[in-house]
Image: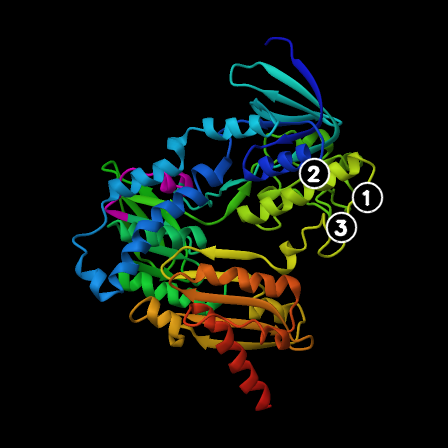
Amino acid sequence: MSAATRKTVDVVVIGAGPVGENVANRAVQGGLSVVVVERELVGGECSYWACMPTKALLRDAAALRAARALPAAAQMIRGDLDPQAVFARRDRFTSSWNDDGQVSWLAEAGITLVRGQGRITGTRTVTATAGDGTTTELHARHAVVVATGSSAQVPPIPGLAEAHPWTSRQAASAHEVPRRLAIIGGGVVGSEMATAFTALGSSVTLISQTRLLPGVEALAGEHVADALRSAGATLLLEVDATAARRDDDGTVHVTTSDGEIVEADEVLVATGRTPNTRDVGLESVGLAPGDWLTVDEGLSVVDASGQPVGEGWLYAAGDVNHRVLLTHHGKYQARALGDAIAARAHGLAPDLSAWGRHSATADERAVTQVIFTDPEVAAVGLSAEEASAAGIPVRIVDHDLGAVAGAALHADGYTGHARMVVDDRRNVLVGFTAVGPDVAELLHAATIAVTAEVPLDRLWHAVPAYPTMNEIWLRLLEADGRDRSER
């Protein structure tokens, strides 16, 4: 091994996914010098194996469903989706797994890239080891940020690992449609991939130990489950996958806890995530490799006693800190953190108060998510169950989204639902969920209402344009007014 190259900068970021990129960019904009270390593709999981390719896989099917819901447009449709055309469009959004464009962006933003595996090797020190064994020793004047994300978790089901299952990476980058696909897991990844591959012509069987989409309101999961069944998917809910094996001919056999055996050509595991922290040198700062990193309000890594590790120079943002495993929330954390590091470097105290400039309050009070199933699910804030568990006196307001004029115009036979979760004491929205075709575009209005803590009496003055699906806000407020007047 050749002698290490040494470099001193203000900030070192391990991981050049969207979180690492945003930390670095905000720190550079704050006048600091930054190096990011990346062992794979610049742009990370979201660009190549998650958000972008999966949504590209789903978009053609969504457009086709929308056209089929309009009589005149439906008459023009001939045949089904061409999987290879779908894959080709997906490949454009991943740049065919080439990161040249994102590397160029780093350079234009004034961020230095070092290729290799980054490991913490001392106080404010990261050693990057390239594929050829050469090393670069990086010393940070102010901060080291771990933004290494997470990977798909393969559960310890007997025989599963030996059956060579797909994870979200293989599903998102597939170039062939399996005739039969078994999916283990009924969360977001499992539900989205069931939607995508059913539309592409695969016979999908989904096995989940919970109801479908347990992370959102049950009514949303029920709508998605009904649609998947109507599309031809088989759902085995509230059962476990207990064993798996792959025959010499490639057939996979998955046994469930109720004794059923599911045969498939491929099996996709979508049962959760594990942190990418096994090889980043956590042992050098007294932490256990492979664990999620715990952080305080300022995203400083803390030990089991809640004390900052390494006198407060070590930070963690994105999936790796296990606050919210969503790309947009990781980027939100990254923007706040990059600005806070720059503020500290210039002798200023960051504002970590609730909703403060350098805080990530939305991680706790206003998590936003769109699930691109058929139908879509859009949610922000707390579910009714979560709000009640938090001790908030809630009232729940429901309305049939299909009864709104804008939805009826949007598609014949439009089916959907919307729910407000209201803090009854303060009369403000703390949660919102909508399920139905194209409900993603309803979400940001709800997000603003939750984060701004707008009283419902003031929301009456936010007049929705007619006839759009946003009229659901008027209908929800009317339903809430009737309910309150009857009490």
What is the three-letter code of the residue carrying label 2?
Tyr
How packed is label 2: few (under 14 Cα within 10 Å), some, or many (20 or more)?
many
Which tag, 1 or 2, sits closer to the chain's start? 2
Residue ID at (43%, 48%)? 270
Label number found at residue 352: 3
Label number found at residue 315: 2
- Judge whether residue 164 is colored magenta: yes
Label 1, label 3: how far apart the Cα atoms are: 9 Å
Which tag, 2 or 3, sits closer to the chain's start? 2
- Give the residues drawn in magenta, as a range: 161-180
1 vs 2, front mark:
1
x and y, in percent, of residue 271 in the image: 46, 50
- Judge whether residue 39 is colored magenta: no
Using the image, determine if residue 139 lies above or below residue 329.
above
**Which image quarter is the C terminus in?**
bottom right
Q: Are marks 1 and 2 in contact (CB under 8 Å)?
A: no
x and y, in percent, of residue 70 in the image: 26, 65
- Furthest toward the bottom, the residue is 486
